[in-house]
Structures are given as structure tokens and as C-alpha cells.
Image: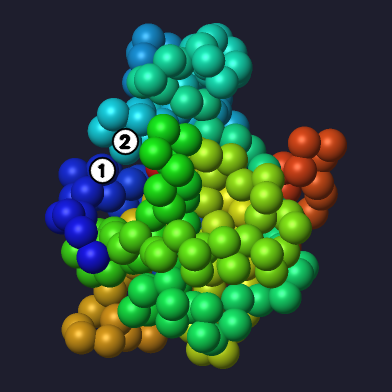
Amino acid sequence: MTGPPAAPRLRAVARRATARTAPGGATSAGPAAEERCDLCAERLAPDHRHLLDLLTDAVSCACRPCSLLFDRHEAGGAHYRLLPQRRLRLTGAPIEDHLWAGLGVPVDLAFFTRSAESGQVTARYPSPLGTLRAHPDPAVWQEVLATDPALADLADDVEALLVHRASDRREQWLLPLDDCYRLAALVRAHWKGLGGGTDVWRHVEEFFRTLDAASATDDTGTTRTPQEASWVSP
């Protein structure tokens, strides 16, 4: 486990998550604050895209013109990458217990990203303090990749393998990184006491139910749900 949690970023994500979603997953009735593009300050549409700053690991909101500027891999250079929209539940065999133990993740809810620059895989898992990190053994990660051919398409830096093994669940998703940050923010915002309490797990299960309830999938692999705007955008 390395490095302190990214507290400022997750605090901002948590504020937006709790402001938009009332207990039980319902959208808050209060007026939503007007959101602006973090690059040019233009007003944002509800379905706006997000950029990852590769230097700081922070996520920024982007209007349509700004997101089009970074729609190609090389457009952002070593600074910005446009986050994808694909949300795909994996149907292959779940990661076996011995492989999970070999990944060095001490909890049952984590997401994994791979760096395009170094090839290093980073495991991140939510906690009441933010996201904590571990670096899995590369040999074990290669064994994980062999469990499902879809994992070969994991996009470097901007996409994550999210694994949910808590309460005997065995769900695995390929998700944009901002979705995983939203989940981490929900855990931090609702954690109580030493074990988290029942409220935090209710929000975690609602997150996965929203993914499961996807009403349609377009030709890019993006799942859309009526509730998407309440949680997908940090």
C-alpha cells in the first residue's frame, strides 16, 4: 500500500454525489448548482464528458467542444486523456480466491488501472479516508488477464477493472475511471464507525443495481440508464 489518499479530489466528488442523490438513491429535490467546464468555463450539459489529468490523477469536467479536442489518444499529449463511456459487465469466470489473495488487495471491493507509460498496474480500494493503493505482482495480474478475454481490451490509464466480491458477490466490470471515483466517494461519504455500517453498503449496492439496470447499450458499448446523471459525473 503506497501513498496518501487523494483527499481533495474525493472530497469534491463526494460533495457532488451527496448533493445530487438523496437517501435511497432518489435525486435531491433542491436546485442543482450550474456546472461549468473546468477548461473553458462554458455551461455543461448533463451528459458531459470528463478528462483525466495524467500528471495529477484528477478528473475534470469538459464541455462538448473541449472534449472533442481530446477525442484522439495523442491530442492530450502527456497531460489530458478523454475518459471513455463504455460500461461493460464481464461474463467470464470471476477471479478465483487464490488469485485475489495474490493481488495483495486486503478488501473485497477494488478497481485496477494500468499505466500506459510504465505498464504498472495499480489497485485502488475505497476507504473512509479516500482511495488506498497497492501494486499487484505482475505475474499474478497476467493470470487474472487470462481469466477473461475481454480484459485484453482494458484501456490504459482511463479505464478500470472494478471487482465487487463483498457479501459473496462476484461482479466484475470494465468502467470509466470517473465511475470508480464516484463509488469511492460514496464509500467515504457514507462510512460510519469501524465496519462502515449498513448505510454505506446500501449505497454500494445501489451503485451496482444502477449499472445492472442499464436500459440500453449503444454501438460503443456505453450503457445508459435513467439514473445515470445522478452518479456518473464527479
Amino acid at dot 1? Arg
Which residue is found at the position 45% from the left and 16% from the top?
76
* Residue 15 seen anywhere in this rendered image of the structure: no
Which residue is found at the position 31% from the left and 52% from the top?
14
Q: Quadrant of the N terminus?
A: bottom left
Percent position of residue 188, x then y: 28, 64
Instruction: Report the label total.
Output: 2
Percent position of residue 106, x then y: 34, 79
Q: Tag 1's secondary structure?
A: helix
Q: Quadrant of residue 97?
A: bottom right
* Residue 39 seen anywhere in this rendered image of the structure: yes
Percent position of residue 201, x then y: 43, 79
Q: Tag 2's secondary structure?
A: loop
Question: Which label sits on residue 144?
Answer: none
* Mark 1 residue crowding within 10 angstroms, few (<14) / some (14–19) / many (20+): some
Percent position of residue 25, x then y: 51, 64
Disc 2 from disc 1: Cα separation: 7 Å
Q: Earlier in the sequence, mark 2 or mark 1?
A: 1
Q: Quadrant of residue 104?
A: bottom left
Q: Which residue is mark 1?
A: 9
Closer to the camera, 165 or 182? 165
Asked if residue 120 is positioned above or below residue 58 in the image, the reply reads: below
Amino acid at dot 2? Ala
* Mark 2 residue crowding within 10 angstroms, few (<14) / some (14–19) / many (20+): some
Closer to the camera, 154 or 66? 154
**Dot in front, 2 or 1:** 2
Q: Which residue is mark 2?
A: 58
Closer to the camera, 12 or 43? 12
Closer to the camera, 165 or 140? 140
| Dots 2, 1 in contact, CB < 8 A | yes
Which residue is found at the position 77% from the left and 36% from the top?
220
